[in-house]
């Protein structure tokens, strides 16, 4: 019999925990398997880029993320029209299209139109039949030197903001920022802003 105010012995030691452990020994083999699958897919879709079609530049939603630029779902019909690319042709030459996308700023419209024009200038179009080349197809010389783009094509590159260095003057040192803020807040309160 146990004495004093202790925990009543109530141990559960026959749980067979070894039966419920999930091991991860197949991870290196899975890694190899995935790499081989990527290589097979690249061979199958040659000469298309391995990362898929071209995506537009869009801004993230909400106040927290709207300063960040990321890859979107597809180009809007307005952007395709401005770049001179028919909406039915675009998916066939590796351009993603999103008919629901709306352009709400002129800057993003211009950036995406420029992106499409750059892509179109670099584009190499293979003919459907090797012997019958149509208008718009690339020349045999260009086709011979074509290589498959591995990874993201025209990836989103974020520009780092530049910091301008200035020499600290006596006026800057003597300026009392906290006092200035308090005075301005008081002025606003007296005027009736707050």
Image (cartoon, rainbow, N blue to C red):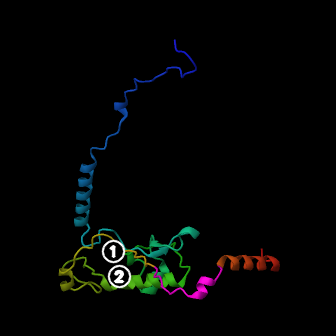
Q: Residue at x 21, y 79 (%)?
A: 146
* Quadrant housing the C terminus: bottom right
What is the span of residues highlighted in magenta in the rendered image? 161-176
Q: Who's the residue at 37% across and 30% down the image?
A: 17
List the residue tagged with mark 2: 119
Q: Residue at x 38, y 75 (%)?
A: 95
Q: Name the residue under label 1.
A: 153
Residue 138 belongs to magenta span: no
Q: Is mark 1 on a helix, strand or loop?
A: loop
Identify the secondary structure beneath mark 2.
Answer: helix
Q: Which residue is drawn at 33% across and 71% down?
A: 152
User: Can you give x and y, in whole percent of width and height, for residue 162 in the image?
Assistant: 45, 82
Closer to the camera in the image, 133 or 185: 185
Image coordinates of residue 129 in percent, x first then y, are 22, 77
Q: Are marks 2 and 1 in contact (CB under 8 Å)?
A: yes
* Residue 172 forms part of the magenta stretch: yes
Q: In this view, does 110 lie above or below 153?
A: below
Between 9 and 46, the one nearer to me in the picture:
9
Q: Main secondary structure of the magenta part?
A: loop
Q: Where is residue 182 in the image (x, y as percent from the top left)?
A: 72, 76
**What x and y, as percent, mark residue 40?**
23, 61
Task: Work out whether residue 173 can be spotted.
Answer: yes
The CA distance from mark 2 to mark 1 is 9 Å
Q: In this view, does 39 lie above or below 67?
A: above
Q: Is residue 85 visible?
A: no
Place residue 150 in its image quadrant: bottom left
Would you identify the image quadrant in which residue 187 lies?
bottom right
Give the number of the mark in front: 2 or 1.
1
């Amino acid at each position: 019999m146990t004495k004093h105010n202790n925990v009543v012995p109530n141990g559960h030691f026959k749980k067979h925990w070894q039966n419920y452990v999930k091991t991860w020994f197949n991870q290196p083999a899975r890694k190899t398997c995935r790499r081989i699958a990527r290589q097979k897919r690249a061979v199958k879709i040659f000469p298309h880029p391995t990362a898929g079609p071209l995506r537009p530049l869009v801004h993230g939603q909400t106040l927290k993320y709207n300063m960040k630029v990321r890859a979107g779902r597809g180009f809007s019909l307005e952007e395709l029209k401005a770049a001179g690319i028919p909406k039915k042709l675009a998916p066939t030459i590796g351009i993603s299209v999103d008919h629901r996308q709306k352009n709400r700023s002129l800057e993003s419209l211009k950036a995406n139109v420029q992106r499409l024009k750059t892509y179109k200038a670099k584009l190499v179009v293979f003919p459907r039949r090797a012997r019958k080349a149509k208008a718009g197809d690339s020349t045999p010389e260009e086709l011979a030197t074509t290589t498959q783009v591995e990874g993201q094509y025209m990836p989103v590159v974020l520009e780092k903001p530049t910091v301008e260095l200035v020499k600290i003057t006596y006026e800057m040192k003597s300026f009392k920022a906290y006092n200035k803020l308090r005075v301005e807040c008081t002025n606003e309160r007296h005027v009736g802003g707050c």
